[in-house]
Image (cartoon, rainbow, N blue to C red):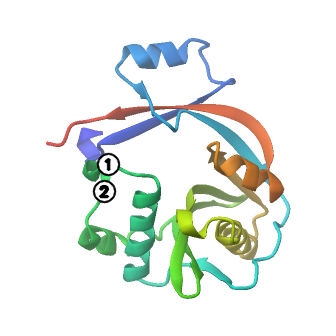
Amino acid sequence: MRAHGVRIGSWWLCERSTPANLEEQLFALGLARVRGDYELAGMLLASAPPPIRTGVEARRVRDAVEYAAARELLYDVFDSPADRRRTRGELEAEFARDDVAGAVYGAWIAGELVGAGRAFFAPQGAILSGGATLEHARGRGAYSALVRARWDDVAARGGGALVVQAGSMSQPVLRRLGFEHVLRFHRLEDVLPRA
């Protein structure tokens, strides 16, 4: 991690992880549970979710300013600690590099950015990450629209599946959109101090 300038490393374990005591071994090495993000459902969608509701625009961000705003929205919704946030300038500079295997998406209602999420692409589909909606906009279709926008991009690439590690807030919405529960994850994390 130090050699590549990475401060935070995550391990995702499930009931199929081996050896059977891997989690205990990782705890002994100093990894810890991620508070509020430890037990997650592995979910799969292999058919198109419902269309985007009228009044919601969801799409891939188009420029560095939208990219930074979407990433900051995710920081805020997930209450990311200050030492894990990049500055606006760092995020805008990151935009050009972040497009290699993934993308950031935004959802707008009445011109306001109210939701964001990420997708990391593979030939078969994409891994969804970080989908979130501002509290005052929940229940209006932004989260569902983010799923549909990422599905549409995957379909345009020739893929036909979305997978996600979903927390307790996302699981009910994802089930309504057609996602199936495949397995249960435990997330452990190792955080190096700032140099």
- Relative placement, left or right, of 69 versus 127 is left
Instruction: Give me the residue at 83% from left, 70% from top.
Output: 50
11 or 137, which lies in front? 137
Name the image quarter holding residue 63: bottom left
Instruction: Give me the residue at 30% from left, 45% from top.
Output: 6
Q: Is residue 98 above or below residue 11?
A: below
Secondary structure of the residue carrying numbered label 2: loop
Q: Is residue 42 above or below residue 20?
A: below
Q: Position of residue 2 (x, y in %)?
A: 24, 40
> On the rendered image, what quadrant is the C terminus found in?
top left
Instruction: Give me the residue at 80% from left, 59% from top.
Output: 177
Q: Position of residue 168 (x, y in %)?
A: 64, 42
58 or 11, which lies in front? 58
Indicate the amino acid at tag 2.
Arg
Q: Is residue 17 above or below residue 62?
A: above
Q: Is residue 123 visible?
A: yes
188 or 57, which lies in front? 57
Q: Which mark, residue 85?
A: 2
